[in-house]
Amino acid sequence: MGFIHGFHRRNLKGDLLGGLTAAVVALPLALAFGNAALGPGGAIYGLYGAIVTGFLAALLGGTPAQVSGPTGPMSVTVAGVVSSLAAVGVNQDLSAGEILPMVMAAVVIGGVCEILLGVLRLGRFITLVPYSVVSGFMSGIGFIILVLQLGPFAGITTRGGVVDSLQTLANSPGLNPAALAVGVMTLAVVFLSPLRLRQWIPSPLLALVIVTPLSLLFFNDDHLIALGLEPLARIGAIPEGGLQLVMPNFSEHLPELVKAGLVLALLGAIDSLLTSLVADNITQTSHDSNRELIGQGMANTAAGFLSGLPGAGATMRTVINIKSGGATPLSGMSHSLVLLIVLLGAGPLAAQIPTALLAGILIKVGLDIIDWGFLLRAHRLSGKTAVLMYSVLLMTVFWDLIWGVLVGMFIANLLTVDSITQTQLEGMDADNPPDAAEGPLHDLNTEEKDLVLQCGDALMLFRLRGPLSFGAAKGISARMGLIQNYKVLILDITEVPRIGISASLAIERMVQEAQSSGRTILIAGANAKLQQRLRQFGVHGELVASRREALQIAAQDIP
């Protein structure tokens, strides 16, 4: 079936088992991400998102064994949308029916933008984000999740971003002992449960089935009220009838929604394609990045019309799916069908899950997302890399998710250009030292050496190698300016495959200066593309096929 990328029927049993296992892991995470993104009553929308995006991204995407659903970065972004809309007066209480259509409008916009990224074939560029930027960004997401879940973990209602949540926690009159006990029990289960048991039952699901009954037994509302304590916050009633159709509201606060949609598209693309690379490494296959973006975009667009949180490729669920036997899109689709069955049949049970339990699960997720290995040793690897990674982390946590990535990429690219430029200039210095006998002669043949010596100081042979970036342009001009006493300039670009615009302009200035001083300029060894580029810039020096030919012409011109 060519319509479904990577589909075949030879692994039916493995795909069904992988999908079932991935669904077991996805259930508590989907509920937790929904609650984190939309606040009280939002857990069910995380489950909607896992069902819709998990099925459609597998059906339409380009990574066969990938499992999609709500993830940390996406839920943090949705929480930011809720905060920004609340700041302009939108009622963030889901029961009021005002906030959800706006959030879903942002989800639809994000889905459409993600489709465009795939249609424009930009997938391969997204995976070129430097590791230091990705590490700082993902660690920042991990810290955001930790901070935002401290309130629910302790039974304190918090709203807004990191700073607002920390201020609320600092000004809170006290903790809810029952919520704190539930949260601590959850952490104990997810961290201390035996490895053998976790191999059969994922620790988040184990926490659900152990801690939820204990919370009903020891912390029911009547007991807590009798003790003068606040009742435990729980997920609450799950809407009956399965997925809920909603009409997104594009008519209000559109600029804010478009910005949020762009952020969701970029984060979803990065999250999904990084997970695709992980899947490729495990399965020894190759994903189709542009098709993956289109599939994820279609899935998120549909999720926006079905009240679902936006999703992306989920690394942990994908790895578990593959390890359990999943190999084709059928595994991701079956994972969604299992979640749909749970939604239709286990709503009353899910309603009793304490939000402190979900906060405990997400604290474990946040700790896992943080790139501790790189975070703790980046300073020993490279000072610049460490500064970049920590800067992206801090910008992500305290400023803005997408700006943290964009500024980080800009700085990383500047550092890369600087490194390439230094390498090019070092090679240029080695090829063109002040004493010509030490440099240009070192790999010339006998005839070329004789011609250079015959010309003497009246000849300036300047050699360039490798692709010339704009960073090398200033160095070319500076080095040429140091040498004045010559009659013939041979610019040898035999080993230059391509040249940037800035470097072309630098060569143009070199030629113009030489010609204005009455000197002869010969450009040797330019390939067809370089000749076309130089002519486009109006470089009128004599183009010569080879260095040998240029040296012969110079020897004839120099008395």
Image (cartoon, rainbow, N blue to C red):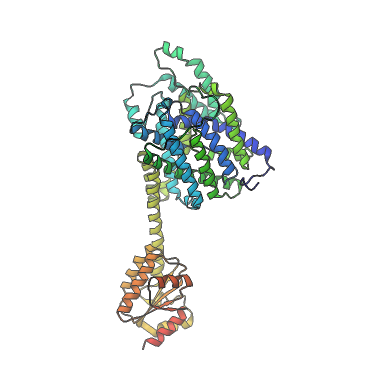
Q: How many marks?
A: 0
User: Front-most of 243 and 358?
Assistant: 243
167 vs 525: above or below: above
What x and y, as percent, mark residue 144? Answer: 40, 36
538 vs 6: above or below: below
The residue depicted at 53 percent of the width and 25 percent of the height is: 208
Q: Residue furthest right?
A: 10
Whether residue 430 is visible, yes or no, is: yes
User: Front-most of 544 and 228?
Assistant: 544
What x and y, as percent, mark residue 271? Answer: 49, 43
Specify whether 433 is left or right of 198: left
Dividing the image into 4 quarters, which one contains the C terminus? bottom left
485 vs 85: above or below: below
User: Front-most of 187 and 133?
Assistant: 133
What x and y, as percent, mark residue 60? Answer: 57, 44
472 vs 143: above or below: below
Whether residue 376 is visible, yes or no, is: no
What x and y, as percent, mark residue 474? Answer: 34, 66
Q: Residue furthest top?
A: 226
Specify whether 174 is left or right of 51: left
